[in-house]
Image (cartoon, rainbow, N blue to C red):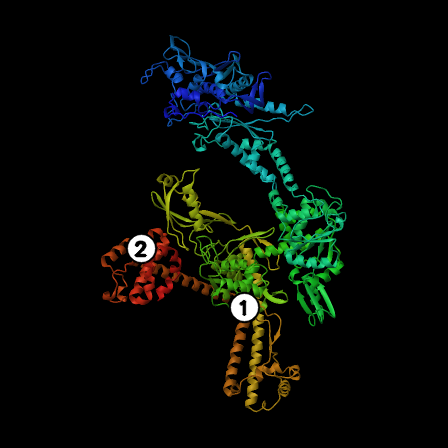
Amino acid sequence: MDVPVEQKAKKGSEQYEKLTQLEHILKRPDTYIGSVEQTTEQMWVYNSETESMENRKVTFVPGLYKIFDEILVNAADNKQRDKNMNELRVWVDAEKGVISVKNNGKGIPIEMHTKEGIWIPEMIFGHLLTSSNYDDNEAKTTGGRNGYGAKLTNIYSTQFELDTVDSKSKQRYRQTWRKNMSVMEKAKIDKVKVDDYTQVTFRPDFSKFGMEKMDADFEALVKRRVYDMAGTAKGVKVYLNGERIKISKFKQYMEMYTKAIKTENIVNDGTAPEQVILTDNPHERWEIGFAVSDGSFQQVSFVNSIATTSGGTHVNYIADQICDKLEEIVNKKNKGGVKLKKAQLKNHIFLFVNALIVNPAFTSQTKEQLTTKVSAFGSRPQVSEKFLKDIAKTEVVNNILHFAQQKADKVLAKSDGGRRQRMNHSKLTDANKAGTKDGHRCTLVLTEGDSAALLALAGRAVVNPDLFGVFPLRGKVLNVRDASVDQISKNQEIQNIKKFIGLQHKKEYTDTRGLRYGHIMIMTDQDHDGSHIKGLLINFLQVQFPSLLKIPGFLLEFITPIVKVWKGDPKHPKAKHDFFTMPEYEAWREQPGHSKGWDHKYYKGLGTSDTRDAQIYFADLDKHLKTFHAMQDHEPELLEMAFSKKKADARKTWLQNFVPGTYLDMSGTEEITYDDFINKELILFSMADNQRSIPSVIDGLKPGQRKVMYTCFRRNMKKDMKVVELAGLVSGLTAYPYGDASLQQTIVAMAQNFVGSNNMNVLEPSGNFGSRLQGGSDAASARYIYTRLSPFARKIFHQSDEALLTYNLDDGKTIEPEQYVPILPMVLINGAEGIGTGWSTSIPQYKPDDVIDNLIRRMDVGEKDAMQPMTPWYRGWTGQTDQIDDTRFKFTGKIEVIDETTVRVTELPVHYWTQAFKDKLEDIIKAEKTPSFIKDYVEYNTPETVHFEIKLEAKTLQQNEGKLEELFKLSNTQVTTNLVAFDPQGRIYKYASPLDIIEEFYHVRLQKYQQRKDWLLSEMHKELDKLNNQARFVNMIIKNELVVSKKKKAVLVKELDKLGFTRFPKVIEAKKQGELEEVVEDDNEESDDAEVAAGANDFDYLLGMPIWSLTEERVAKLNKQIGDKEVEIDILTAKSPQDLWKEDLTELRTEYQAYLDEEKARDKKINANGRRASGKLGIGGQASKKRNANDSDASESDFAPRSQRRPNLRLLMDCSAWAPRLSRSQQVSTQLLMALSRNLLHRHQPRSRSLWRMRSSRRDLSPSLPGLHRRLPQIRKR
């Protein structure tokens, strides 16, 4: 075996060598001209035989191509120096391997360089690193920049000849270099009288490029570059080998490419789709062309005559503009389709760009790709709108949509099912025969959640496990009608259903024999959400597999009872009834004999039923199983109306025509039509969704808010309660169907009182309920904040009305009323925002005084026209409100000029939160694409007020004089065109104006005042009758006309009846809210059945009177009470409903104003205390000087004698060690804390020492500040 010869180590001097720059260029060509190895690329070249462009694989040497291009671009650059240049001539002699380039126009100055002492032409072409492009401060639009250029061509040529004429000096200069610029002949200078020109002729050193001579591919590439010049050099005639190229415009040049594409696309019949070229000249330096590509992005682009074959920032800049427009168009036409990336849109574009860029930069010396930033282009053209619209009319949009559809089909087909016997899924209980030849007989039960699946599994055991499978759905199925392909393909529930059943995308089904399951059975709760789940499943099948719904018996529904009633033992009842809808149950209950003697059980969902119930249900399938009728021709349109975003208007009409009381009667029917399901069942879900989102026009409340008010009134909540506790209480008392988190948010929103929240908050905030800084999103957790009824809440929702309200029932239990009837339309006071199904609402807020005044005008005059138009109003907002027209109002903040560079903003438009404005200022300051007009800003905001001081450029302030509101976007608009609410009959209604809302409210409220008066008079007369009976009873005992002692109660009752005393059954009538049914109170004393049967308790108001009441004094007191009650009755009788209403409104106005005054006084006091604290802490120059001079506080007389004070405990001195690490708010809080602690130290030294231990652990102080800050009120109090 040969042993390798050991290499002898090189000496240091042998390892390192020094080259001349010329030698370095020849040894390392990649750095200067690119690769000198052959490469093969797909590219456009000129075909001399067909005289057209063709796209084919070309083998060439990039470095060789580069040295030719340098000379060609230099010639073209002369056009930028001399606009008179109008000719460019190129000769290519492939046999000799010689290329010559000549241009007219201003030539090279033929003179001696004063500094270098050589001829300028020699310096330009024969000396490295010489150029006229080194001044980067000068904006140039030429191709050269680095000082190599033509010298590189010279270096890589065996012979290089220069011939130039300078007409100014009337001289002609000729010079030749040989052997890679190493040999330079003496220049020949002659006197001539001809026009300027410059001609360069060179023979490349093919050996340096691994070639022997010029090949056909390189020749084709050279000729294409000559044609490039013909298309891009405006006003220049281009000649190739003596023949003028018949192209003078960029569009003609582009047509050479599109003709080639058309030729490639010729089909069998000899035709090809027409190729359209669109052009645009958005700027004098830019020419743009567009054509439709064949499915991959193509570009032909030039920068300052350089062919940027790899594109670059200039191409991307134009392509992005086109793609943005295409994306907008395609997204509109491809809603729900596959989301296409920009690169995928780009693949359908053939883009031509010819641009002049100032001082261009490239990825390398080969200049194939532009890297200049857009901001440095020297021009930033925007393609014209017409150009973009014309592009949209080409086939490019259809091509993209076709591509998107193909991509969508591929994506959706990935989850196709098959007829496999076994499926591996933890939640699926498969039918034993699913996927077999009997699969079409099997039924897949889709249940609402796991608890329902347990019920179905129990029932499955009763029927046939071989033919029934069970799968629980997680929540609601995706609405595929408006969902994107990406959403559908990633939705696990949809993919599971497809696989379990064996469905295949886009397949038409006429029967179910090829499927794993031949039937789907839906098993959901019998509530609104259950109906929605059914609707979503039907919607999915109709959109994705419409043919399945036309197969009779494919879709089934399993229904369970909502209410069960029975007599006797529930396990062995004497009689029983199951009800599948509440209206059906209510109708049965109203029949004679059905209100008593029956036990009732309400089934909130499938989870209420146990496994025994399930077995009973499945054993009686005829009663519980319903089949959907084969879908009819008109029914897909109904599903589209219910689920498509495009059908919002049709959905509005559908819901507006809803008649309360409508329901789908399941009794006595085996088949359900999709029409009935949509119009009688699904509509109830949509209405429930609207009821959650849209308020009642009468009380201005949504159901959740109404439940909160009911609970607070029921508990008479005058003391603070934690929000989290109140939410739990509301949920328990009112059967709230959703999570406590939602209720907590509702409670917080009802208690908020910052600017832009509530004008009249019926709940009082105690704690941090949010502020205008972040629009309430900065509220503390519900665990830490408290609330109670506001002082004026009972003035708005009068207690006397509660006996007149109609209350809802849930599980047989009375809960909140259908609607309250406040004394003024709260929907106008606090406004409303909400988005439901098909409907949304946006009602501005109005001033309570304005609403009250209009109600009084309506009462006084008796006509609607007496009311006056109102302007929206928000409590505490100090900006300007202007009415634009009948339905639009403009809200403008406040901004003022302080000096020539500073403005002050002290108010923002309504619902424009402080933090959002601050974020906007930061965005402007940090903006990269546009120069910032803001230099800096400071803020003095509080949770209640806005105060920014903003520094601007003086120039900006002058230019925007009178337009500052527009500059800072300090205005917004509200409209009164979407005043949607539920009317008194429970129907959705769109009101034309706020006055129409008042008019609707007026009639309901006035009627309720009449009912209140009648009810109050009835109650007063009962009380008067009772007082008269009591006075007569006592009189008779005093006069011994009636003896009550030593008699049985039954005897006394008979005697009282005989004497004509009125019976008052001991019954609590529905006077308190929520207590609708009469409840007989328990008697404390024992009584036998005979006495009770005789109604002994009916006279307890007499017989239960204490012994001391049987006196003449008591008679006198009763007679006075009788007189007072008669006066009350007379006063009330004399009053009209309008009088009662006005009294309530006056009381409310007084109470509310007192509340506002108290709030104002409290804020004023806090601000005053704050200013005093600032003075003590040295916040402010004068206070600081005074303290430093006197070393004492204003309140020092309250402290211990000076002799007992500790002079070393100077708190503010301690701040210096760690204060710089704290925020400004922490520093202020800390200063205040320390000042208070110092005061305490002298008064309660033993108790305060622990506070001072923190001096030894300063590094831990910052994190503890929030806790210390919360203790300030307690410290101050102590």
x and y, in percent, of residue 735 in the image: 59, 63
Q: Secondary structure at mark 1?
A: helix
- At which x and y percent is residue 689? 60, 55
Rendered position, 865 above or below 357? below
Instruction: Identify the amino acid type marked 1.
Output: Arg
1233 sits to left or right of 1189 = right
Q: Where is residue 139 shown, x and y percent of the image? A: 40, 26
Which residue was labeled with disc 1?
714
Q: Dot 2 lies on which element?
A: helix
| Amino acid on which the number 2 mark rests in the picture | Cys
User: In the image, residue 850 lies at what x, y percent?
Assistant: 48, 58
Residue 1215's disc number: 2
Asked if labels 2 and 1 touch by Cβ distance under 8 angstroms, the answer is no
How far apart in space, not on screen, are marks 1 and 2 (Cα)?
52 Å
Frontmost residue, 613 versus 1041? 613
**Looking at the image, residue 651 lies above or below residue 1095:** above
Sequence-first disc among 1 and 2:
1
* Residue at screen point 51% across, 56% down: 831
